[in-house]
Image (cartoon, rainbow, N blue to C red):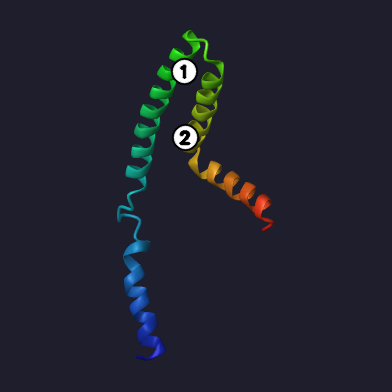
Amino acid sequence: MTTYELATSVVQLTAPLANPNVPTGADFKDWVLVIAGNIFIAILVLRAIGHYFKREWGELFGHIAAGVLVGGLIYANNQTINVLKGFWGLLSGGN
């Protein structure tokens, strides 16, 4: 196989990916993340209310911290991933 034939086959394989009308599943992924995140946050809120009435302050603050983390992951997932990558780079000594 020559270089020209190889390049032609790669272009033919990637041509459907360049078409903006081909569905990528990104909208479905966002929809699933929002639905799952809302369910998880609702469960955290219900459990936090229970901890508040039982005066279990450590568990209450833990649920608040978990809710903030999950909310960040769900509603601003790309930005949160970038922050976590930067934090990991600081910890591992990478750039």
The answer to whether 83 is drawn above or below residue 67 in the figure is: below
- Secondary structure, mark 1, is helix
54 over 91 or under it: above or below: above
Residue type at tag 2: Tyr
Q: Which residue is mark 2?
A: 75
Name the quarter where the C terminus is drawn: bottom right
Query: 45 left or right of 32?
Result: right
Image location of residue 80, percent across then percent down: 54, 41
**Residue at x-position 48% and y-position 31%:** 71
Seen from the viewer's position, the closer of residues 80 and 93 is 93
Quadrant position of the N terminus in the picture = bottom left
Q: Nearer the viewer, residue 18 or 85?
A: 85
Q: Residue at x 39, y 29 (%)?
A: 40
Question: In the shown orientation, is residue 57 left or right of residue 11?
Answer: right
In the displayed orientation, state which residue is furthest to the bottom. Answer: 2
6 lies above or below 91 = below
Mark whose residue sits in front, 1 or 2: 1
In the figure, 30 relative to 56: above or below? below
Task: Identify the amino acid type marked 1.
Answer: Ala
Q: For residue 48, which numbered disc appears in the image?
A: 1
Does residue 51 appear to the left or right of 13 in the view shown? right
Q: Where residue 46 sits in the image (x, y, percent)?
A: 40, 17
Residue at (37, 47) in percent of width and height: 26
Q: Point out which mark residue 3 bears.
A: none
Task: Compare residues 46 and 5 and report the one nearer the observer.
Answer: 46
